[in-house]
Structure formats: C-alpha cells, structure tokens
Image (tube, rainbow, N blue to C red):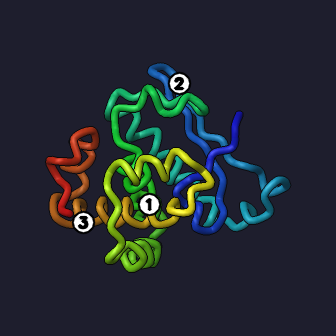
C-alpha cells in the first residue's frame, strides 16, 4: 500500500484510508515502524482523522483507492482534509490544532485549484498552508452551520463555505 500523508501530517503522521462501496480500510504504521505512533494521543488523533476520511467517502458515495489520483472521490480534497482535521481535533479534544491552523491560514490566499494541486503533490511547498486553509474553512462552516449540516452537504461546499 502506498504511503499517504494524512492531514495530521503537521507532526509527520502517516496514515491512509481506502474506501469502496463494500469495504473500508484504515492503515497506520505500527510503533515499531513509526515510533511516534507509540504516543497514544497522537495515534488516537491519526485514527480519528483517517476514520473521518472513511465517513466522508461513505456519506458522499465516494470510492477512494490509494494511488488513483482520487478519481472516485465526490468531494474536493480540501473538504475531505479539512473535515478530517476538524473531526480528529474534536474527537481528541485538541482545539489547539484548529487554533494553529486558523492562525496559519489567516491572510494566505489560495484558490480551490491551488488547494487541489497542493493536496495532490505530497512534496508541494504549499501543502502545509493548504491543510491550514482547508481546516479553517471547514471550521468556519462548522461554527456557522453545525456538524450535521456540513456533513450532510460535504460534496456541495458552496452551501456552507464562508470565504
């Protein structure tokens, strides 16, 4: 399975979620491969993040196969990653993750196309900014509309975005 950086990648976390209509798989490195995964709090955040990807794929009828360029996804990469970061921060009661992302995203302009490009290229210099912007956008929507509304409309962010 190819390695994929998760949105929890601010601390170097590596995980992957794959989803098809009848099967979902979350893969994480064992602490013997990635010693940082021996930190239970970090591992919970990473697992929550990857499960959020599975939930988003299920909600939108998406199919996520690692290495296919997200061809089967029915939601924008920034929505998928921003939702996963926000959900993981909420599950692990770590609001500092959101505060940090909001601070880093402040005043950084990035179009939806630039966000998509940064998420597709694991080595893009803008990747960290893209995660921050996506996290801040989804956070604003969650504050304005609530989790149920945002989750219901993941594939249609124009219904809830405030740029």
For label 3, the residue is 140
Q: Residues within 10 Å of mark 3 (few under 14, many from 20)?
A: some
Give the residue displayed 17% in from the left and 53% down from the top.
Answer: 160
Mark 1–mark 2 Cα distance, whole angstroms, equals 29 Å
- Could you say whether the residue bearing mark 2 is in a helix, strand or loop? strand
Provide the residue designation for mark 1: 130
The answer to the question of whether label 2 and label 3 lie on touching residues, with beta carbons closer than 8 A, is no
* Residue drawn 52% across the image and 59% down it: 127
Label 1 and label 3: CA atoms lie apart by: 15 Å
Of residues 18 and 42, which is closer to you in this image? 18
x, y percentage for residue 124?
A: 57, 56
Residue 151 coordinates in the image, percent (x, y): 27, 46
Q: Is residue 32 left or right of residue 106?
A: right
How many numbered callouts?
Answer: 3
Say which of 47 and 81 sits in front: 81
Q: Earlier in the sequence, mark 2 or mark 3?
A: 2
Q: Which mark is residue 19?
A: none
Residue appearing at x 60%, y 51% in the figure: 122
Towards the viewer: 111 or 152: 111
Q: Secondary structure at mark 1?
A: helix
Q: Position of residue 7 (x, y in %)?
A: 52, 57
Instruction: Name the residue beneath numbered marker 2.
Output: 23
């Amino acid at each position: 399975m190819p390695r994929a950086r998760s949105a929890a990648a601010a601390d170097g976390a590596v995980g992957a979620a794959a989803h098809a209509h009848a099967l979902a798989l979350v893969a994480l490195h064992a602490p013997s491969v990635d010693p940082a995964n021996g930190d239970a709090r970090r591992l919970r955040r990473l697992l929550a993040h990857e499960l959020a990807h599975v939930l988003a794929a299920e909600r939108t009828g998406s199919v996520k196969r690692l290495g296919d360029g997200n061809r089967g996804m029915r939601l924008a990469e920034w929505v998928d990653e921003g939702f996963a970061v926000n959900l993981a921060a909420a599950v692990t009661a770590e609001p500092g993750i959101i505060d940090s992302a909001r601070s880093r995203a402040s005043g950084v302009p990035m179009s939806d196309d630039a966000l998509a490009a940064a998420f597709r290229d694991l080595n893009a210099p803008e990747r960290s900014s893209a995660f921050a912007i996506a996290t801040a956008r989804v956070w604003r929507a969650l504050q304005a509309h609530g989790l149920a509304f945002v989750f219901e409309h993941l594939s249609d962010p124009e219904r809830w975005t405030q740029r």
